[in-house]
Image (cartoon, helix red, strand yellow):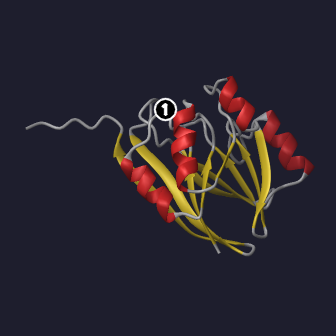
Amino acid sequence: MTKILLLSDSHSYIDDRILEYASQADEIWHCGDFGSFEIIEKLEKIKPLKGVWGNIDGAKIRSEFPEVNRFFCEDVEVLMIHIGGYPGKYTPLANKEIKEKAPKLFISGHSHILKAMFDQKNNLLHLNPGACGKQGWHKMRTMMRFIIDGEEIKDLEVIELGAKDLKFEI
């Protein structure tokens, strides 16, 4: 059994809540747009990190992470691409990768739109954790956590981290 914390689009922002959830996971997966290498260093200090680079990530991050990451977690094949689309609207790169060999779990980010959808045509689960950072057009900062147990993906949870523009008045 492996507990996963799924992040995307941190855009150089991380806070104690994200780090607390990270400490409860067995692995952290980040679907691109880290924004800065410091985010990677903070997450790697806590738990093993898997990910892909995103369109805002520079050369240093691109040298550490691939554009397409295909791996197994227990008995589940995972495909991760930052700009991948979603069922019925996959990008050309995602379409190519899925047609070559459909994974059981396809993860993308980029849109800042949280999605969990089953793709019946390709028999896979698609997840997009939204955006955990504060930059972008999203209103609510989000991430996901779930468990992979053998070949089963279960206990999917959406974590709302709060509005990205929290303002406190006294």
Q: Residues within 10 Å of mark 1 (few under 14, many from 20)?
A: some
Q: Residue furthest right?
A: 100
Looking at the rendered image, the quarter that the C terminus falls into is: top left
Q: Residue at x 57, y 57 (%)?
A: 47
Q: Could you say where residue 98 lies in the image, as x and y percent from the top left?
A: 84, 48
Question: Where residue 151 appears, x then y in whole percent?
Answer: 75, 73
In the picture, residue 51 is in which quadrant? top right
Q: Is 115 on the left or on the right of 104, as rendered?
A: left
Name the secondary structure under disc 1.
loop
Residue pictured at 49% horizontal, 51% vertical: 143
**Horizontal placement of 141 versus 119: left or right?**
left
Quarter of the N terminus within the rendering: bottom right
Nearest to the observer: residue 123 or residue 101:
101
Q: Is residue 21 left or right of residue 45?
A: left
Which residue is tagged 1? 12
**Residue nearest the viewer, comparing 79 with 86:** 79
Residue 80: horizontal and vertical position, in percent?
72, 47
In the picture, measured across the screen, residue 164 lies left or right of residue 35, that is left
Q: Is residue 158 visible?
A: no
Q: Tell me which amino acid carries mark 1.
A: Ser
At 71% across and 36% down in the image, what residue appears?
64
